[in-house]
Amino acid sequence: MSIIVKGKTALVTGANRGIGRDIAIAFLNQGAEKVYLAVRNRASVNDLVNDYPGQFEALEVDVTNPNSVQALAASAQDVNIVINNAAVLAPSGVFDDNVFDSFEQELNVNTLGLLRMARAFAPVLEANKTSTFIQLNSIVSFKSFDSVATYSASKAASYSFTLSVKNEFEQKGIQVHSVHPGPIATDMSEQAGVKDIGEPSSVVADDIIDVLENNVFLSFPDEIAK
Ligand SMILES: NC(=O)c1ccc[n+]([C@@H]2O[C@H](COP(=O)([O-])OP(=O)(O)OC[C@H]3O[C@@H](n4cnc5c(N)ncnc54)[C@H](OP(=O)(O)O)[C@@H]3O)[C@@H](O)[C@H]2O)c1
């Protein structure tokens, strides 16, 4: 049980699969009072909500849609900890035909999605005491990989915005953490062709609990990231 998480209300975007799902489960296991599962399709978390009614609650969000993100914040006024995890990867190198389409899609979800979430939840987190915003970034925020050049650029930009969000949020009494995994065995790493070397997504979930306990800004959860 985590002293920091105990009794808190958390919200995880992209909580239906991969890393987000394990983060949501970890928060409940660590004593969170409630975890909002912010997903595009509520039916995708029926199993979790049915197993833990009242503790898991499904809320709909598409982080590319500003109205949807605002509606999410309006429905989760009691949240103390927001974990912005939702992202997409559309593999593309600089000279691939799909480079512009890929980058537009990744920017919209991975980078502008962060901006929309931070702006919508700023007043909620400021009003609720001891609150925290956690952004899922990546090792590719620091090092571009040629086969996922556009995704790398979107995650570099999301890290840059995380630094600005940190400065702004700290003035409002909100902690910010930036989490930078290497390859983790999920659908996304399969798309990137690195699933075989990925550690389980529970490694990231456990790391986020440590980040909160030890109040570190930057974290590198798995061996490759370290
Ligand atoms: N896996 C890795 O190797 C790795 C490494 C470093 C960092 N990360 C980061 O860790 C986070 C989680 O990655 P993952 O591997 O768990 O990815 P994943 O398995 O591909 O899952 C992505 C999640 O994001 C949701 N999502 C996508 N677009 C969305 C939108 N417009 N609105 C709301 N939700 C949306 C998906 O929902 P649907 O099911 O509806 O599509 C899904 O729940 C991401 O930020 C990723 O960049 C992953």
Image: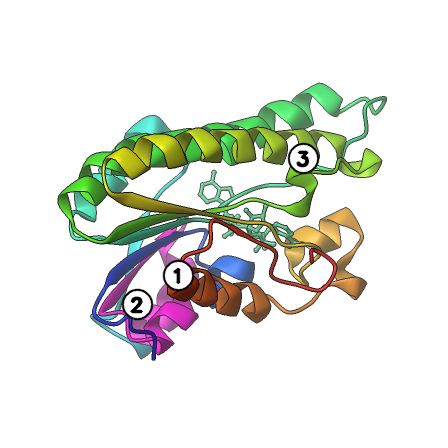
Using the image, tell me which numbered label, if any, was put on residue 5. Answer: 2
Picture coordinates of residue 216, whole percent (x, y): 46, 55
Image position, residue 209 (x, y; %): 43, 66
Q: Check the image and report above or below for 7 versus 102.
A: below
User: How many dots with numbers?
Assistant: 3
Circle 3 residues within 10 Å: few <14, some 14–19, many ≥20 = many
Q: Is residue 86 above or below residue 54?
A: above
Give, as a single range, the part of the protein colored magenta: 23-50
**Can residue 68 be seen in the rendering of this structure?**
no
Q: Whole-Å distance between the Cαs marked 3 and 2?
A: 31 Å
Where is 12 relative to 62, above or below? below
Q: Name the residue: 85% across, 21% down.
A: 95
Q: In terms of sequence position, does the residue under pointer 3 or pointer 2 come before the other?
A: 2
Badge 3 residue CB within 8 Å of ligand 1: yes
Applied colour scheme: rainbow
Circles 2 and 1: CB atoms closer than 8 Å: yes
- Is 171 displayed left or right of 209 in the figure? left
First reached walking from the N terminus: tag 2 or tag 1: 2
